[in-house]
Image (cartoon, rainbow, N blue to C red):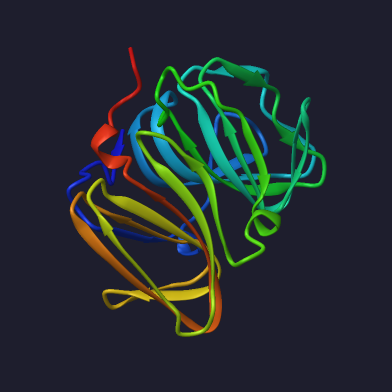
Amino acid sequence: MELNADFCERVVVHANRLDWVASPMPGVERRMLDRIGDEVARATSIVRYAPGSQFSAHTHTGGEEFIVLEGVFQDEHGDYPAGTYVRNPPTSSHTPGSAQGCTIFVKLWQFDMDDRTQIRLDMEQAALGGFAVLHEDARERVTFHKMAPGEALESALPGGGELLVLSGSVSEDGDVLEPGGWLRLPVEAKLKAVAGPDGAAVWMKTGHLPFAAPPAA
């Protein structure tokens, strides 16, 4: 399967307007944002766990990065409430689920295969000054921004970038993105996003698109 797989194109997805699609695991549904592959895929998705649902134990061969958007995500390592940012690197394993239900934004198979950095952060706590670097390495930079009404977020993107609106709204090149709005910009693009009248909270990743590829065989 290929969805928004041309990384030379600007892509906007209003995820909250998409239908939920069942996953192979009962009680777990998803909204796909981009994807290369079938069930083993380089994928960016919004995933919803019904109360009491869980996946079977598995190893993240290609790594997993996610934000808890609503509810509490759980595994044997702990509970992760809304606002938590997690990186589970290649070779990590867990049994994910949610007793009360949750929704997460998740990226799979997008790590350096030698990366072993485990991260679990409360984004609000990390961004006490309105901004936080959640992760940075030679391939990418991941940040969290709390924007005041009318504030502009501008950046040159030599390695491309993507942005997810967590609350409030932003406008970018004529598109208004509200919570669940996802934007991906290609290599050498320039970002100028402006927060709406209620401000915005935004997750952003830059520099990573030159490394976009299907999962390793």
Screen quadrant of the C terminus? top left
Which quadrant: the N terminus? top left
Residue most extreme to the front: 129
Foreground residue, 22 or 138? 138
Across and down, in percent, residue 85 comes to: 62, 45
For residue 66, above or below residue 172: above
Most extreme residue toward the top is 217
In the image, residue 165 above or below residue 194: above
The answer to which of 48 and 24 lies nearer the viewer is 48
Q: Position of residue 34 (x, y in %)?
A: 36, 44
Q: Is residue 188 left or right of residue 3?
A: left
Q: Nearer the viewer, residue 109 or 46?
A: 109
Q: How many marks?
A: 0
Question: Which residue appears at 20% of the width and 44% of the height?
Answer: 6
Question: As displayed, is residue 24 above or below residue 16?
Answer: above
Q: Position of residue 131 (x, y in %)?
A: 55, 62
Q: In this view, does 196 lie above or below 212?
A: below
Q: At x 67% / y 63%, what residue is drawn?
A: 128
Nearer to us in this view, 5 or 25:
5
Kindly identify the residue that appears in the image at 43 percent across and 23 percent down. Answer: 40
Q: What percent of the width, then of the height, locates residue 204?
A: 44, 55
The picture quadrant where one finds residue 176 is: bottom left
Residue plotted at (72% across, 44% down): 50
